[in-house]
């Protein structure tokens, strides 16, 4: 007769097994789906989420609702997603917003392992810019100028992983450059154009208005590949500065109890609705690029981010904010 210990272990194993069978996964969703977005309406991830939601609702035959939960360094949205505990409630947003959480907080209100990547949707285009009349046009010239003037240069960067990437670059190149903190990073390109700071690293969508106005110019693209809005600007790696490389990964996350079959089905549906190119075209206008990937691809991309952040945090002896 099985022991009480073995019966308990078997019961726990059953409870831990995802309840969605392969057949049920193919019939999912059976009711409206909700994408929780950690930003307000009009943000890049919100626009991307709505573009995919519109197409997916047609494919799934169920409404796909966007619920905006901005604030709290994305933790408000993450907690709302996890507390729902529902396989029809998913999180849509950039992984970089919470890749840095374990390094920024001594105690987190959630377990990062509970956020399971399902489908990579797009990349936010990231670039760094300087004042239009600055005498440097690439990373080498900028780096040499900063190194020759320790403590005299400053910059603005989007809080989170973008900061870590710039810190890693500054550490690697032994630069003494001051970061100016911004409550609203959209102000930084304006300050750059007026000469109050010397550089900005942010999404292309944030710097684009000042570029179009002729007040600032790019000196590097941080993504792994060149970007359509600036095809002649080399990437950080092409310029010989891989420490400045960054992929702005955006995608869909689910609960860890979700079955592999359901994750693969949702990822395949993302790929199917993106196939006609209409989402890619509309994303381009918002400084984003389509980059569909399944659970394995998304996990590998995020793990690469985490390793980069961890290496930088260790190198600069970074201490959590709280």
Image (cartoon, rainbow, N blue to C red):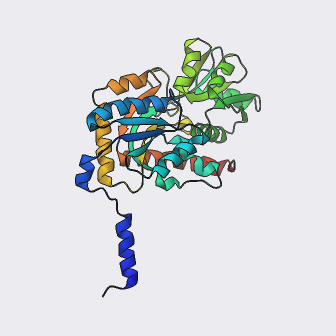
With respect to residue 87, does 207 lie above or below? above
Left or right of 49: which side holds 19? left
Left or right of 161: which side holds 15? left
Q: Residue 293, percent across and down?
A: 36, 41
Q: Residue furthest top?
A: 213
Q: Residue furthest front?
A: 31
Left or right of 124: which side holds 160? right
Q: Residue furthest right?
A: 151
Depth check, front residue: 312 or 238: 312
The residue under the point 41% across, 29% down is 289
The residue under the point 55% across, 54% down is 110
With respect to residue 48, does 137 lie above or below? above
Q: Residue 47, percent across and down?
A: 45, 28
Depth check, front residue: 30 or 72: 30
Depth check, front residue: 35 or 31: 31
Q: Residue 76, percent across and down?
A: 56, 44
Q: Quadrant of residue 166?
A: top right
Q: Quadrant of residue 19?
A: bottom left
């Amino acid at each position: 007769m099985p022991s009480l210990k073995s019966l308990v272990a078997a019961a726990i194993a059953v409870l831990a097994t995802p309840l969605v069978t392969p057949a049920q996964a193919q019939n999912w969703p059976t009711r409206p789906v909700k994408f929780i977005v950690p930003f307000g309406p009009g943000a890049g991830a919100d626009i991307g989420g709505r573009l995919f939601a519109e197409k997916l609702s047609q494919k799934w035959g169920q409404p796909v609702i966007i619920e905006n939960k901005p604030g709290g360094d994305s933790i408000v949205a993450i907690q709302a997603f996890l507390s729902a505990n529902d396989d029809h409630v998913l999180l849509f947003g950039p992984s970089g917003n919470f890749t840095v959480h374990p390094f920024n907080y001594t105690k987190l209100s959630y377990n990062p392992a509970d956020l399971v990547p399902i489908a990579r949707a797009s990349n936010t285009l990231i670039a760094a810019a300087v004042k239009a009349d600055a005498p440097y046009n690439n990373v080498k010239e900028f780096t040499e100028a900063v190194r020759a003037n320790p403590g005299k240069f400053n910059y603005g960067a989007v809080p989170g992983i973008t900061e870590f990437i710039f810190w890693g670059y500054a550490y690697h190149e032994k630069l003494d450059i001051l970061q100016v903190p911004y409550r609203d990073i959209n102000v930084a390109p304006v300050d750059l154009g007026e000469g109050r700071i010397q550089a900005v690293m942010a999404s292309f969508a944030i710097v684009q208005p000042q570029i179009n106005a002729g007040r600032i110019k790019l000196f590097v693209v941080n993504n792994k590949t060149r970007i359509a809005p600036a095809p002649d600007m080399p990437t950080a790696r092409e310029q010989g500065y891989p420490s400045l490389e960054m992929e702005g990964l955006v995608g869909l996350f689910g609960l860890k109890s979700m079955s592999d079959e359901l994750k693969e089905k949702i990822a395949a549906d993302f790929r199917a609705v993106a196939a006609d190119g209409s989402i890619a075209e509309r994303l381009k206008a918002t400084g984003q690029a389509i980059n569909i990937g399944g659970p394995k691809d998304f996990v590998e991309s995020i793990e690469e981010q985490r390793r980069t952040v961890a290496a930088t945090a260790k190198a600069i002896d970074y201490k959590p904010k709280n």
